[in-house]
Image (spheres, rainbow, N blue to C red):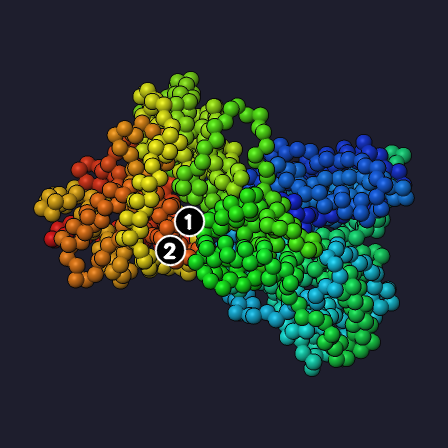
C-alpha cells in the first residue's frame, strides 16, 4: 500500500484548476451536502471525527502546487479541515447557500469544510468539498467514514497510490496513442457537428432558481416495469424523457446533454475520495416519428457507447471534436443530466445516517444538493431510500423560474405518458417560445439590444478598431476571431484603461468576454463614460486583486516596466493557467556550471547576498497599477542558495531550474547547488527573462565565483535612451520589415494548435573549425558569423521553399560601458533576407552582413515596440514577426551542462551557436509539439554541410 505525498492532477482536474484560476470566487465546482440534523450532536466529537477523516484522506486538506513535472496536489502537512458552528437568523435554504458557496483557495487549502448551522427552527450540517478532490461516489465514502470515526471506530486506510496511476493514465489517454481509438470515436460522434440546440430563453429577471420534486412511488414502479419491457434501464427511461423534454423546449433538430460517467472503472478505486467523474456529451436528433420507446432504446445505446469510450478525459473529447474555446463551451455546455444512486454503499442511508457516540444520538437527512458543475441547467436524479428525487438547478437564472417550473411540469407529463404507453409519439415541440439570443449572452448577461448601440459600445468599438485595424466591428464580433493576438490584447487593455482613467479591464476580462457586446458590459460598471439607464451588466468574474494597497515590505521604488518586461508580464498573465497549468517556464533563463570544488556554504551565501544587493534587477518584482505594468525595486529580496542532496542526479537539478517563477511575489533569481561525491559540484543559476539575459547570468557566475560585483541599475540604463532615438530606429527598421513577410513554414509533423503551445526539445551537433568559413568571410569583407547565418538561411529556404525569409537574431544590447549591468538588455533583431534559387551564396552572405549591420545600427528599436509599429498578421498560433531565432555566443566561461540549458523562448526553431575549440557547438532548440528529433537533427546536419566547402563556394 502506498501513500504518495504529491499526486499529479488528472486532465479533468487540470481543467477544474484552470476554471478556478479564471474565477477564484466562483462556487460552481463546490459540491455541497447539507443534512438536516435531528437529535443531539456532540461538537467536540464531530471535530475529532473530521480531524481523523483529514488524516485518512489528506487530499481534503491538500493544495495545488506547480512543479516542473506539472501540477500536483500536495497531500502533506496541509491545514486541518475547519469545523465551525454558526447561529443564524436567515431562512434555512439561504443560510445553507451562504455556507457552501464560500470559495476555496486551491493554492492554500484545505479543500473541505464543515459547518453546523443553527436557526430558529432548524439545525443543518453542511459538508462542502471542492470538486477537485470529490465526486458523487466520494460522498458515500466520506459519510461512511464520518459515521465510523464519530462512533470511535477506525476505518481501513485506502491505497492512495491508485490516484497517481489514474492521473498518469488520464494523460496517456488524452495525449498518447492509447487514447486514439477513443479520440476517433468522439471525432466521428461530435466532430464537424453544428449543434442546433439551445435551452429555452428566460422570461424572468435573472435569479438563482432551484426546484425539487419526488417522483411518486407508483409512477416510479410503473416506469421500471416499462424499462424492462423496452429492454433498457430505469435511468435510460428517465434520460429519454429528458431528451424528449429538451426537444420540446429547444425547438431545434438536435438535443445535447452531458451525462456524468463515474470513472471508477476498477475495484481499487471504489473506496477512494477523489474526483473520477467524467461528464460525457450525448447528442441525439429526435424526430416526430419517434416514440418514447424508440428514443429510450437509442439514447440507451448512445450512453452505452459513450461510456465505452468514457475514460478519455472531457478536455480531450472536446479537442478531438474540434469544440474548444469559450465559444464552443458556451454552445455545448448548457445542460447536464446527473444521476446519483445514493443507495449503492451498504450501511449508508442518506435519509437516515446515524451519528452516535456515548449519550449523543443524532440522525442526518440529506437536503437538496445544489451544485451545477458550471452548466446553465443541471438536472439531478437521485435514488435513495425515500425514492427518486428530481432536482432542477438554474444557478445563474439563465432559464429562469417560470421556464424551470414549466420544464418540471412537462417532465412529469412525459414520465406519465411513458408509464401509460411507451409507444406514444413524443410530446410536441413548443412553438411559442421567443427566439433565444444564444448561450454566450446568457452565460454572462450582457446589454440589451437597445444598449448594444449606445455610446459605451460605440466608443469601445472605436478602441477595438484602432487596435485591430478592422472597420465595421459589430456587437457580437469576437476580438480573437477578428485577428486579435497576445500583444494586441495587451494593447487593447492598456488603451481601455487609459481612455477611462480606471483599471476597468484586464487580460482575463478580455479572455472571458471576447465579444465586443460582452466585453463592454464587463467593463462598463467601472468605465462607462456617462450614466446609462438600467442596471449595469453583471459579470461573475471578480476584478484582479488590488495590488496598489500599502504593503508592509521594505521601501519600494516603482518604475515603469520596459516594453520587453511588459511582454513578459502579459505572457505570464495570459498563459498561466490557460495555455499551461502554471506560469510558463520557457522564460526561465539558466546557466548550469560544473565546478571542480563544492563551494563553502557561508561564502556562497555571502556572495549571493552581495550580487543581489549590487544589482537592482535582482531585487525587482512586477505589478499592474493604474493600467500600467510597473517594476517594484525592493531594498532587499531573500535569495538563498538551495542545496540538493549529494548524488541525487541531474533530474533533481532539472526540476530546480524548470520550476515556475512568480513575477508578483518573486524573487526572480534562484541559485542551486548539487554536490558530487568526488568533491565537485553543479552550480545552477536560474533567472526570469524579465530581469536578466544570458550575459547577466555569466556576469553573475563570475561574481559568485570571486569577482567583485559592481552596482548596476537596469532602470537607469533603460531611461537613458532618448525617446527620439527609439522612434527613429523603429521607423528605420519598420521600413525594412513592412509589409510583414509570411511566417516560415517548416514541415510540421503534427497539426498546429490554434493558440501557441510550446514543448521544448533539443538536438545538439558540432560545427567544426573550418578555414573555408574564415577565408570566405575575409574575401567578402564580412564576419564568420555572417557566413554561418547565411548557410542557415539557405537551409531554411530549402526546407520551406520560401524566398522572403525573416529570422530573429539575439543582440546583446551592450556596449563596453554597460557590461557590468545585470538586466534584460539583450534585444531581438528581426532580419529580412531574399534567398531564392538565383541568389548565389556570396550574394546571400553579403546581404546577411548588410542587414545585420543595419539592424545593429538601429539597435534602439526594441523588439516589442517594433511589433506594435509593424502590426503583423494576427496569428495566435505563432510568435510575432518570426518563428526562427539565431543566437551566437562568443563567451564560453566555465564548463557548462548543455543538457540542462533552457530559457530559449518558444520559437519553432532556435539555433544557438557557442564558440568552442576554434569552431562552434550548435544546439537546435525546437518545439517538440510540432517537430520530431530526427527531423531537426537532420536539419542540423544539413546546416553543418552547408557551412563547409564546397557548399559555401
For residue 545, side relative to residue 468 (left or right): right
Percent across and percent down for residue 316 are: 53, 58
* Total number of numbered discs in the rendering: 2
Single out the residue that lies furthest toward the bottom: 289
Residue at x 31%, y 40% (from the top left corner): 725
Front: mark 1 or 2: 2
Checking the image for residue 759, the label placed there is 1
For residue 215, side relative to residue 655 (left or right): right
Checking the image for residue 361, the label placed there is none
| Closest to the observer, 404 or 795 | 404
Q: Upstream in the sequence, badge 1 or badge 2?
A: 1
Image quadrant of residue 102? top right
Mark 2 residue crowding within 10 angstroms, few (<14) / some (14–19) / many (20+): some
The secondary element bearing badge 1 is classed as: loop
| Closest to the observer, 205 or 688 | 205
For residue 872, side relative to residue 666 (left or right): left
The secondary element bearing badge 2 is classed as: loop
Residue at x 37%, y 55% (from the top left corner): 872
Q: Which residue is mark 2?
A: 872
Percent across and percent down for residue 557 are: 47, 28
Residue 437 shows in the view: yes
Residue 133 shows in the view: no
For residue 596, side relative to residue 63 (left or right): left
Single out the residue that lies furthest toward the top: 602
Q: How far apart are the alpha carbons under marks 1 and 2?
A: 24 Å
Mark 1 residue crowding within 10 angstroms, few (<14) / some (14–19) / many (20+): some
| Closest to the observer, 113 or 19 | 19
Amino acid at each position: 500500500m502506498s501513500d504518495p505525498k504529491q499526486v499529479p492532477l488528472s486532465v479533468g482536474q487540470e481543467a477544474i484548476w484552470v476554471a478556478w484560476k479564471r474565477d477564484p470566487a466562483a462556487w460552481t465546482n463546490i459540491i455541497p451536502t447539507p443534512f438536516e440534523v435531528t437529535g443531539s450532536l456532540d461538537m467536540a466529537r464531530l471535530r475529532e471525527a473530521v480531524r481523523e477523516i483529514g488524516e485518512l484522506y489528506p487530499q481534503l486538506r491538500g493544495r495545488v502546487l506547480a512543479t516542473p513535472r506539472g501540477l500536483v496536489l500536495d497531500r502533506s502537512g496541509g491545514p486541518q479541515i475547519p469545523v465551525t458552528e454558526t447561529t443564524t437568523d436567515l431562512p434555512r435554504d439561504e443560510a445553507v447557500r451562504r455556507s457552501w458557496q464560500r470559495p476555496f483557495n486551491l493554492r492554500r487549502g484545505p479543500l473541505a469544510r464543515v459547518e453546523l448551522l443553527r436557526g430558529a427552527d432548524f439545525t443543518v450540517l453542511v459538508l462542502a468539498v471542492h470538486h477537485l478532490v470529490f465526486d458523487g461516489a466520494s460522498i458515500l465514502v466520506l459519510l461512511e467514514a464520518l459515521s465510523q470515526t464519530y462512533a470511535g471506530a477506525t476505518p481501513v486506510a485506502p491505497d492512495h497510490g491508485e490516484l497517481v496511476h489514474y492521473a498518469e493514465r488520464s494523460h496517456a489517454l488524452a495525449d498518447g496513442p492509447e487514447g486514439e481509438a477513443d479520440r476517433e470515436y468522439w471525432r466521428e460522434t461530435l466532430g464537424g457537428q453544428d449543434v442546433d440546440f439551445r435551452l429555452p430563453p428566460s422570461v424572468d429577471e435573472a435569479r438563482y432558481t432551484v426546484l425539487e420534486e419526488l417522483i411518486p412511488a407508483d409512477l416510479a414502479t410503473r416506469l421500471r416495469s416499462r424499462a424492462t419491457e423496452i429492454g433498457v434501464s430505469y435511468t435510460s427511461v428517465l434520460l429519454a424523457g429528458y431528451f424528449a423534454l429538451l426537444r420540446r423546449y429547444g425547438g431545434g433538430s438536435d438535443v445535447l446533454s452531458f451525462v456524468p460517467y463515474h470513472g471508477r472503472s476498477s475495484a481499487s478505486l471504489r473506496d477512494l475520495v477523489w474526483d473520477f467523474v467524467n461528464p460525457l456529451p450525448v447528442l441525439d436528433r429526435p424526430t416526430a416519428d419517434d416514440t418514447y420507446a424508440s428514443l429510450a432504446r437509442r439514447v440507451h445505446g448512445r450512453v452505452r457507447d459513450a461510456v465505452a469510450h468514457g475514460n478519455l478525459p472531457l478536455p480531450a473529447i472536446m479537442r478531438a471534436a474540434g469544440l474548444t474555446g469559450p465559444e464552443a463551451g458556451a454552445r455545448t455546455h448548457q445542460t447536464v443530466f446527473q444521476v446519483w444512486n445514493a443507495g449503492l454503499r451498504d450501511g449508508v442511508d442518506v435519509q437516515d445516517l446515524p451519528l452516535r457516540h456515548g449519550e449523543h444520538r443524532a440522525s442526518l437527512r440529506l437536503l437538496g444538493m445544489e451544485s451545477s458543475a458550471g452548466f446553465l441547467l443541471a438536472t439531478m436524479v437521485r435514488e435513495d431510500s425515500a425514492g427518486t428525487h428530481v432536482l432542477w438547478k438554474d444557478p445563474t437564472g439563465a432559464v429562469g423560474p417560470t421556464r424551470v417550473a414549466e420544464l418540471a411540469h412537462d417532465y412529469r407529463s412525459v414520465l406519465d405518458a411513458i408509464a401509460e404507453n411507451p409507444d406514444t409519439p413524443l410530446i410536441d415541440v413548443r412553438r411559442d417560445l421567443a427566439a433565444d439570443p444564444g448561450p454566450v449572452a446568457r452565460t454572462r448577461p450582457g446589454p440589451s439590444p437597445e444598449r448594444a448601440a449606445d455610446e459605451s459600445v460605440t466608443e469601445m468599438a472605436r478602441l477595438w478598431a484602432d487596435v485591430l485595424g478592422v472597420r465595421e466591428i459589430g456587437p457580437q464580433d469576437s476580438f480573437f476571431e477578428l485577428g486579435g493576438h497576445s500583444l494586441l490584447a495587451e494593447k487593447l487593455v492598456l488603451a481601455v484603461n487609459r481612455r477611462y482613467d480606471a483599471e476597468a479591464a484586464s487580460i482575463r476580462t478580455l479572455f472571458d468576454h471576447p465579444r465586443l457586446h460582452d466585453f463592454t458590459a464587463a467593463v462598463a460598471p467601472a468605465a462607462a463614460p456617462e450614466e446609462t439607464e438600467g442596471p449595469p451588466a453583471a459579470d461573475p468574474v471578480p476584478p484582479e486583486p488590488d495590488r496598489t494597497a500599502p504593503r508592509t515590505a521594505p521601501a519600494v521604488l516603482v518604475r515603469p516596466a520596459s516594453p520587453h518586461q511588459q511582454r513578459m508580464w502579459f505572457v505570464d498573465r495570459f498563459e498561466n493557467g490557460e495555455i499551461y497549468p502554471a506560469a510558463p517556464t520557457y522564460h526561465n533563463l539558466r546557466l548550469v556550471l560544473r565546478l571542480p570544488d563544492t563551494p563553502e556554504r557561508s561564502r556562497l551565501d555571502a556572495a549571493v547576498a552581495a550580487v543581489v544587493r549590487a544589482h537592482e534587477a535582482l531585487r525587482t518584482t512586477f505589478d499592474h497599477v493604474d493600467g500600467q505594468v510597473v517594476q517594484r525595486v525592493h531594498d532587499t529580496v531573500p535569495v538563498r542558495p538551495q542545496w540538493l542532496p549529494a548524488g541525487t542526479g541531474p533530474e533533481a537539478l532539472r526540476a530546480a531550474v524548470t520550476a515556475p517563477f512568480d513575477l508578483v511575489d518573486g524573487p526572480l533569481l534562484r541559485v542551486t547547488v548539487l554536490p558530487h561525491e568526488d568533491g565537485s559540484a553543479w552550480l545552477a543559476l536560474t533567472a526570469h527573462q524579465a530581469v536578466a539575459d544570458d550575459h547577466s547570468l555569466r556576469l553573475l557566475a563570475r561574481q559568485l565565483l570571486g569577482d567583485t560585483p559592481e552596482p548596476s541599475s537596469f532602470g537607469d540604463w533603460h531611461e537613458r535612451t532618448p525617446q527620439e532615438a527609439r522612434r527613429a530606429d523603429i521607423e528605420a527598421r519598420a521600413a525594412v520589415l513592412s509589409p510583414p513577410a509570411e511566417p516560415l513554414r517548416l514541415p510540421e509533423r503534427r497539426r498546429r494548435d490554434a493558440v501557441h503551445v510550446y514543448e521544448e526539445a533539443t538536438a545538439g551537433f558540432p560545427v567544426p573549425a573550418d578555414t573555408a568559413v574564415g577565408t570566405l568571410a575575409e574575401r567578402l569583407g564580412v564576419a564568420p558569423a555572417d557566413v554561418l547565418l547565411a548557410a542557415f538561411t539557405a537551409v531554411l529556404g530549402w526546407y520551406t521553399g520560401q524566398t522572403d525569409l525573416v529570422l530573429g537574431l539575439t543582440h546583446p544590447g551592450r556596449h563596453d560601458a554597460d557590461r557590468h549591468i545585470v538586466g534584460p538588455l539583450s534585444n531581438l533583431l528581426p532580419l529580412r533576407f531574399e534567398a531564392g534559387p538565383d541568389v548565389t551564396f556570396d550574394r546571400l552572405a553579403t546581404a546577411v552582413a548588410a542587414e545585420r549591420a543595419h539592424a545593429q545600427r538601429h539597435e534602439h528599436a526594441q523588439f516589442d515596440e517594433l511589433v506594435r509599429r509593424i502590426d503583423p498578421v494576427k496569428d495566435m498560433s505563432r510568435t510575432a514577426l518570426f518563428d526562427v531565432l539565431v543566437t551566437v555566443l562568443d563567451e564560453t566561461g566555465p564548463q557548462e551542462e548543455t543538457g540542462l540549458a533552457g530559457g530559449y523562448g518558444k520559437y519553432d526553431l532556435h539555433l544557438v551557436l557557442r564558440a568552442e575549440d576554434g569552431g562552434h557547438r550548435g544546439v537546435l532548440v525546437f518545439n517538440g509539439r510540432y517537430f520530431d528529433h530526427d527531423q531537426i537533427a537532420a536539419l542540423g546536419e544539413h546546416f553543418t554541410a552547408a557551412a563547409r566547402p564546397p557548399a559555401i563556394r
